[in-house]
Image (cartoon, rainbow, N blue to C red):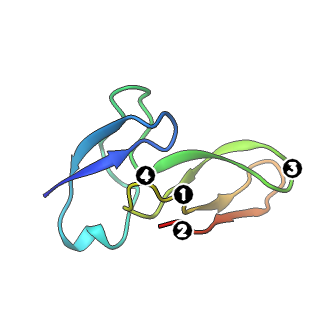
Amino acid sequence: MDTQYDCADCGCRFLIDISEEKTRTFRSSRPERCPRCGQEVGVGEVTCRECGTAFPANMPHWHIHCTLAAGPCPNCGKEYVSACIC
């Protein structure tokens, strides 16, 4: 099924093909990239709340306007976690 995807970096909306099962859990091992900025589907830039460093993190959620993200900061090592806003 085709699903609308919003690039976490530039906001470009485009269609990606996913199975019904994968609509519940996102995995970033997808080949698609944003047609506008080239960002990998399932990855977006976040800013560490501890040290202010910007870095790419996995966006493990399929909701269109969700900012759920997680990953270790490459500068300070603090784990970045944001809550789902859907």
Residue pictured at 43% horizontal, 52% vertical: 42
62 lies above or below 55: below
Q: Which residue is mark 3?
A: 51
Pinpoint residue 26: horizontal percent, then vertical percent: 38, 64
Label 3 or label 1, whichever lies nearer to me, is 1
Image marks 4 and 2: residues in contact by CB distance under 8 Å: no
Q: Which residue is mark 1?
A: 67
> Residue type at mark 3?
Cys
Residue 74 against residue 86 in the figure, above or below = above
The residue depicted at 33 percent of the width and 28 percent of the height is 35
User: Hey, what amino acid is under mark 2?
Assistant: Cys
Determine the residue positioned at 18% across, 70% down: 20
Crowding at label 1, few (<14), some or many (≥20) Cα neighbours within 10 Å? Answer: many
CA distance separating discs 1 and 4: 11 Å
Q: Which mark is residue 84?
A: 2
Residue at the spot x=37%, y=61% of the render? 62
Marks 1 and 2: CB-CB under 8 Å?
A: yes
Closer mark to the observer between disc 4 and disc 2: 2
Of mark 1 and mark 4, the one earlier in the sequence is: 4
Spatial CA distance of label 3 from label 4 is 24 Å
Three-letter amino acid code at the position of disc 4? Gly
Image side of residue 20 versus residue 58, left or right: left
Residue 54 in the image, given as x and y percentages of width and height: 71, 41
